[in-house]
Image (spheres, rainbow, N blue to C red):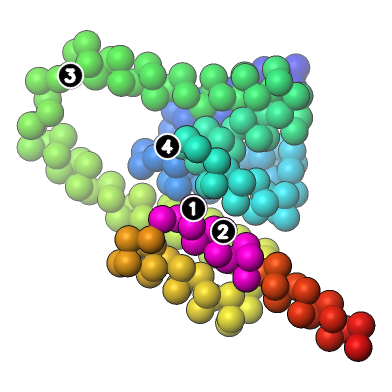
Amino acid sequence: MNELWQLFWSFFRIGMFTLGGGYAMLPLIQHEVVEKRQWVDSKEFIELLALAQTAPGPMAVNAAVFVGYKRKSLAGSIVATLGMTLPSFMIILFIAMYLIGFRENRYVESFFKGIRPAVVALIAAPLYSLGKAMKISWFGIILAGSVAAAIAFADISPAIMVIVIAALGLCLGIIQKKRKAA
């Protein structure tokens, strides 16, 4: 099968069968691009997620752009992005055309309330496996928790936190390098 078609079809399936948005798509994206297709390895996937998170726009779409570009340059980016976004577009179009009257239906509301715990689990599972792949230390766990708390409770911009933590990582890397050289 043509790799452009594989990019489109892989991201189309991810977009079609994921409820809950970008973070809920992480386990499917990870399975498809790291484990099944081996388009990127675990380390590249972690770096890709960091880049996708900091770039403007939806994280899952950014991930599709980056994976597509890595595999097939501009054409790969375009088809992967189309694959990721087309299902949502079709679903929203369908809802707008036919189901707007169901907005306040108690069964529809119950359905969305019911899937919330599953979405949380879908977000937590890849975070755990990514943490294991990164061989994160206790310091890293505490730092990640602190950053999450700062973003959630202190209303600090995630972009600012990324810059601060990147600068901290750079400083720690320089210090470690100097210690090894001494």
Disc nearer the start of the sequence (1/3): 3
Return the mark for residue 107: none
The answer to whether residue 134 is left or right of residue 145 is: right
Q: Residues within 10 Å of mark 4 (few under 14, many from 20)?
A: some
**Residue 107 drawn above or below residue 5:** below
Residue 82 falls in image quadrant = top right
Q: Residue furthest right?
A: 181
Pointer 4 residue: 18
The x and y percentages for residue 180 are 88, 84
Mark 4 touches mark 3? (CB < 8 Å): no
Element under disc 4:
loop
Pointer 3 residue: 99
Q: Nearer the viewer, mark 4 or mark 1?
A: 1
The answer to whether residue 104 is left or right of residue 20 is: left
Disc nearer the start of the sequence (2/3): 3
Magenta stretch in the rendered image: 157-168
Element under disc 2:
helix
Magenta segment main secondary structure: helix
| Gap between marks 4 and 1 measured at Cα | 26 Å
Residue at image point 38% right, 61% down: 156
The amino acid type found where label 3 is placed reads: Leu
Residue at image point 48% right, 57% down: 160
Return the mark for residue 163: 2
**Residue 114 drawn above or below residue 153:** above
Element under disc 1:
helix
Residue 6 or residue 178, whichever sits in front? 178
